[in-house]
Amino acid sequence: MDPIVWRPDPDRVARSNTRRFMETYGIATYPELVERSVSDPEWFWDAVVEFLGIPFQRPYTHVRDLSRGRPWARWFVDGRVNLSQVCVDRWAASDPDRVAVLSEREQGGEPGRLTFGELADRVSRLAGALRDLGVGHGDAVAVYLPMSAEAVVSLLAIARLGAVFIPIFSGYGHEAVATRLLDPKPKVLITADGFMRRGRPVAMKETADRAAADAGGVDHLLVVRYVDRSDTPWAEGRDVFWDDALDAAAPVAAVDTDAEDPVLIAYTSGTTGRPKGAVHVHGGLTVKLAQEGAFQADLHPDDVLMWATDMGWIMGPWMVVAGLANGAAIATFDGAPDHPGPDRLWAITEKLGVTFLGISPTLIRALQPHGAETARRHDLSSLRGFGSTGEPWNPDPWWWLFREVGDEQIPIVNISGGTEIGACILSVNLLQGIKPTSLGGPALGMAADVFDDEGRPVRGEVGELVVKEPWPAMTRGFWGEPERYLQTYWSRWPDVWVHGDWASIDEDGFWYLHGRSDDTLNVAGKRIGPAEIESAAVELPEITAAAAIGVPDEVKGEVVMVYCVPAPGITGDDDLARRVSDRVAETLGKAFRPKEVRFVPDLPRTRSAKIMRRVVKAITLGEDPGDLSSLENPQSLEALERTGGGS
């Protein structure tokens, strides 16, 4: 059993938001707080609103309403609250000169800077510009922008109007963009003339034009002069420049929105079929994300929060709300974290004074071969914490980040949830201390458990991660597909959300994830998660990433196949394949020795850095890989098809 390797010092404990909350409400220990947050959710969420000073335009009459059943729970009933007002207005009124948004571009230069007063002006004027373009309460507005200050302003302005924000990943092609425009039918698509990615121009406006033509129904394109192209394609009467629209608009105050009014439709890909649009609302999303920023990231007004992300991943909106709702500054970056060199992420951290930096295990595995000196050449003294999400950790990269980069002084706040969760199910809290690769335990207010195949709670063994009670940020269903939502999450056991992850809890009560339960391999009747096999493979310094899949076998039913990405300068040959196979067998047992190890230059992954094992398996077996619109690196498929297609 792993030891606790980090604990906060007494001063950090005393300053923490969690400790101050416990003292305010007379709670002695963190486990007692976790228990009460789950057993008495009405008390807990009401206390969160009070403690964080979240301004409701009209108070709610009930915290929670289950009259339609747990899958359709309503929160902060009869209350009126606007996400934009919570994140912007109160800070603009009390401290308008405090920095709210910092922004860095790939090509460098002086970072952008908006104070809360300036942010309030931009947001209210963009809301006015959108209103002038015909957007009103309940209308959808799609945002296809680089991760930038303009993307932040767009989210807040759309929420301010009571409209619905549709974020679209900045790396999508026109078909994927069009797919996300079809159902919500946005009146306006906000985009840019282009941006730079790995030193190459990305022609966003052309992609947006094609997507709007394919989807139909888009009345206006609002275009940011992001790279100030002179040859931007233009449709007179439809296209409007961002600056011109804001200059002509009158500021708009935050609309009086119901707590259950939709504010965000976040698309997530399914195994097959069209992407699912998870619906989120003003009250539940705002309160839950504000609580996570306060109690998990432990954000204060003097912090700078940055997550290496895109607005098209749930962590983009998470960063905006978790940071700004707590009065902290947030920082955006529109480029690749390892371009033009592997120290770029650390350089930005130093330049912007980032205090809480969000990353993914895949990103750290990509940076690790370049050595810790790439981080050490920069002053990282501002950092108080790392955030981590996207997938389970392998021990070696976790230890590298903790020891070699963080000098065992910077905690890794590992969290896990999802687009439909709107936030986290599991999270490290600093008061618990930290174990390597662990997720700590259930996030406050989350009635999480681990079930066996019969729906019984289990400890000390791997089972299904479930949630037994609803929570405020839970999706209000899939846009236009209520039955698909119920079938996906609520159909296995009555009134239990089944998340689709394998989890376990150790003797000290620390939780771990073991990959997606639908990725499970069954070798001669023995079940194993692919993450365990991949973890063994990447223990070899010559391997930077791996994907383990099960392929049919006449004798064993299923056998293991592993695709590996060699480290820079390493050739994937028979000798390396044998050593990968030996390492898996030594670590997990001979029964799980891979039948075959194949080498590819890259593996298909989402923007959130999750390796898409289902795509790897489908290509290997010559099957339909399903929805590929969330792929960050579609070029990886060509090598997979050459290496393993149809085997």
Image (cartoon, helix red, strand yellow):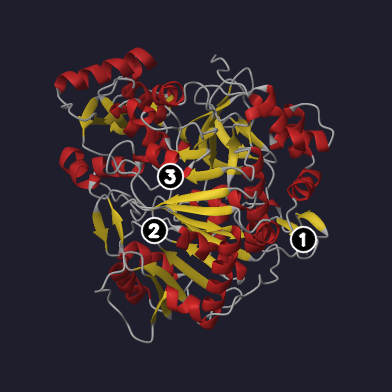
Find residue 535 and report its image quarter.
top left
- Does 453 appear above or below 583? below
Residue 93 in the image: state x and y as whole percent.
69, 61
287 left or right, relative to 129? right
What residue does disc 1 label? Answer: 77
Residue at 50% x, 65% y is: 154
Is disc 1 surrounded by few (<14), some (14 to 19) or many (20+) residues within 10 Å?
A: some
Identity, as a three-letter code, of the amino acid under mark 1: Val
Q: Between tags 1 and 3, which lies in front?
A: 3
Alpha carbon separation for disc pair 1 and 2: 36 Å
Alpha carbon separation for disc pair 1 and 3: 35 Å
Is disc 2 surrounded by few (<14), some (14 to 19) or many (20+) residues within 10 Å?
A: many
Residue at 69% x, 23% y is: 10
**Secondary element type, mark 2:** loop
**Secondary element type, mark 1:** strand
What residue does disc 3 label? Answer: 308
416 left or right, relative to 50? left
Q: Nearer the viewer, residue 329 or 460?
A: 329
Residue reaching furthest bottom?
237
For the residues bearing labels 2 and 3, Cβ distance under 8 angstroms: no
The tag earlier along the polypeptide, 1 or 2, is 1
What residue does disc 2 label? Answer: 146
